Amino acid sequence: MTRKERTLKRSATMEGVALHSGETVQVQIEPAPAGTGVIFRRGDRPDPADIPALAGHLAMSQRRTVLREAGCDVGMVEHLLSACAGLGVDNLIVTVSADEMPGTDGSSMPYVEMLEGAGIVEQKRERLRFTVDEPHVIREGEAELVILPPSGEGLRIRYIPSYPDGVDSSPVVFDSATGDYKKEIASARTFVRAEEVEALLSAGLGKGATADNTLLLGGEEAPDMRIALEPTRHKILDLIGDLALIGADLHADIVAVQSGHGLNQAMAKHIRGQFEAKEIADPGMADGYSITEIMRLLPHRYPFLLVDRVLKVEGWRRAVGVKNVTINEPFFNGHFPDQPLMPGVLQLEALAQLSGFLLQRKMEHTGKLVVLAAIDKVRFRGGVVPGDQLRLEVETLRMSRNRATIKAQGKVGLRVVSEAILSFAMVSSS
């Protein structure tokens, strides 16, 4: 069953200590337009890039979830993202004063209370959803994460843990359709095994951990649990937060055996890829624009119009489009005609045109024209040949009245074939 997207009625702030760095951190959350998603910004950086909470922005990390864009990192995002998913809050701007979110009390409850205190309001746009239609399995050692087609409505998670002697290792089941996230999951705190403490501290982690915000498992004294099976409920909390990086409501049954952030994030990337492929294959998933609407905003015409369809536009932040590559393309007559290969510069042009479409929507009634001004960090990672469907993805990193910086990426299937940072100027069209 579909639902409407949600954001906040007003802004809210929080201050707390980061669990790993031990720094005091300030956070501000603000409402955002429908289609924005959750966006993180580093308030301590001049001219910071937007960091979308999507699996494509995951960075390698230990024992936490870190997002990265244009040299800016924000870590420990999983507790806030879990709270957002648990309450159905989809669109937020999150400004944080350091590279790590506050650890609060080790759970997502303070974030739940922060979101509820700001007021949750419904928006007009329908929330994207992804229903799993075949099994997906990721394994690492004894850990395993299995995602299956749903047996009911929503997301059903069964977590099977393994703990030291004296800690209850019974499975926990949480069903988003029938359960209560706030009551069953949100108050569960993070934990650490006694034998891991020294190694974590040596690695510079856990500087903000205390007996109040972190359960110690396998120590001399049994931990004082807030709720039954608290460590396993926290594992489900983390899993919900990590899978929120898919960028859509997930409808599936999940069986998790000793899984942690590594497996969670690998599955989030995999399912995000499946979701993107389905967007192209199923036009009904998209709320995009026809070629007629594209030509209304873009000045390009055949043979230089290189965007065939715009699948989706999320505010002025992100757009996804498609270029269907056929042997009839005029450039194949002179570019390796015996072994047709789409020129890399034309892949960049297609990405620039989609970026122009995204930005021109904002400029449409200003009398200004969006013009490509610079290209940076260009990478070509694979060939594009006749029969390929080139998926074009562009995301706004920075935007002002006269300038914009866009991260652009071309894909064939799940394979990245081209990427660049594009800079645009808004100039008078007269």
Image (cartoon, helix red, strand yellow):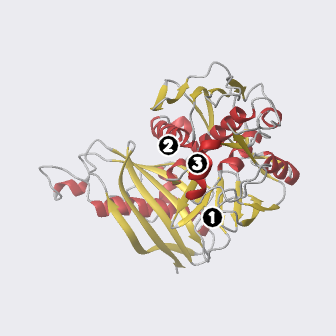
Judged by depth in the image, the label closer to the viewer, 3 or 2, is 3
Q: CA distance from mark 2 to mark 1?
A: 22 Å
Q: Measuring from the top left, give residue 293's x and y in whole percent.
A: 52, 53
The residue to which callout 3 is attached is 63
Residue that carries the numbered disc 2 in the rendered image: 269
Does residue 156 appear in this view? yes
Q: Does residue 210 appear left or right of residue 75 in this picture?
A: right
- The x, y position of residue 23, in whole percent, is 70, 66
Q: Assess disc 1: are there few (<14), some (14-19) or many (≥20) residues with their C-alpha within 10 Å of its C-alpha.
A: many
Amino acid type indicated by mark 3: Arg
Residue 155: percent from left, percent from top: 66, 29
Circle 1: residue type: Asp
Q: Which residue is mark 1?
A: 99
Element class at badge 2? helix
Nearer the observer, 123 or 212? 212
Mark sitting earlier along the chain (3/1) = 3
